[in-house]
Image: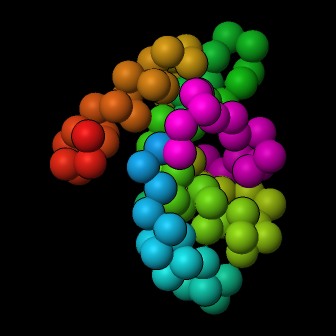
């Protein structure tokens, strides 16, 4: 599902383990139309999209000035997004 990047909210105030080099490397690829994995967001009852995974992809897409991004949308809460993100970071060996 494609959703507006402007509708994706951060579930907390951390940098989500941002790899600045990865963002810099992804940006020109995205600008040239490369396919990237969807970000993962949790959509709550109020319609908010809370970012759970894919912060580097989201930042690179913003830098590439995209308006929308491919996303896997899961029903859940802001807290669910934080739990998912923490599990993803552990799985990636980044936490």
Residue 66 sits above or below residue 6 on the image: below
Q: Is residue 13 above or below residue 35?
A: above
Side of 83 relative to 51 (left or right)? left
Q: Where are the magenta residues, as a range?
A: 1-15
Q: Quadrant of the C terminus?
A: top left
Colour scheme: rainbow
Quadrant of the image occupied by residue 30? bottom right
Q: Residue furthest top?
A: 45
57 or 70: nearer the viewer: 57
Does the magenta segment cover residue 2?
Answer: yes
Q: Is residue 62 visible?
A: yes
Residue plotted at (67% across, 83% down): 31
* Image location (x, y in percent) of residue 7: 77, 39
Across and down, in percent, residue 88 comes to 30, 40
Does residue 35 appear in this view?
A: no
91 relative position to 22: left or right = left
Residue 72: horizontal and vertical position, in percent? Answer: 50, 42
**80 or 37, nearer to the observer:** 80
12 in magenta? yes
Residue at 44%, 63% (x, y): give it. 19
- The residue located at (74%, 57%) in the rendering is 68
Q: Position of residue 33 (x, y in %)?
A: 62, 82
């Amino acid at each position: 599902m494609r959703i507006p990047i402007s509708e994706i909210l951060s579930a907390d105030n951390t940098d989500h383990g941002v790899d600045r080099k990865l963002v810099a490397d992804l940006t020109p690829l995205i600008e040239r139309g490369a396919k990237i994995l969807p970000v993962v967001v949790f959509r709550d009852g109020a319609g908010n999209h809370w970012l759970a995974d894919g912060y580097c992809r989201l930042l690179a897409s913003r830098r590439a000035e995209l308006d929308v991004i491919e996303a896997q949308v899961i029903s859940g809460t802001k807290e669910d997004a934080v739990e998912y993100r923490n599990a993803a970071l552990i799985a990636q060996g980044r936490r």
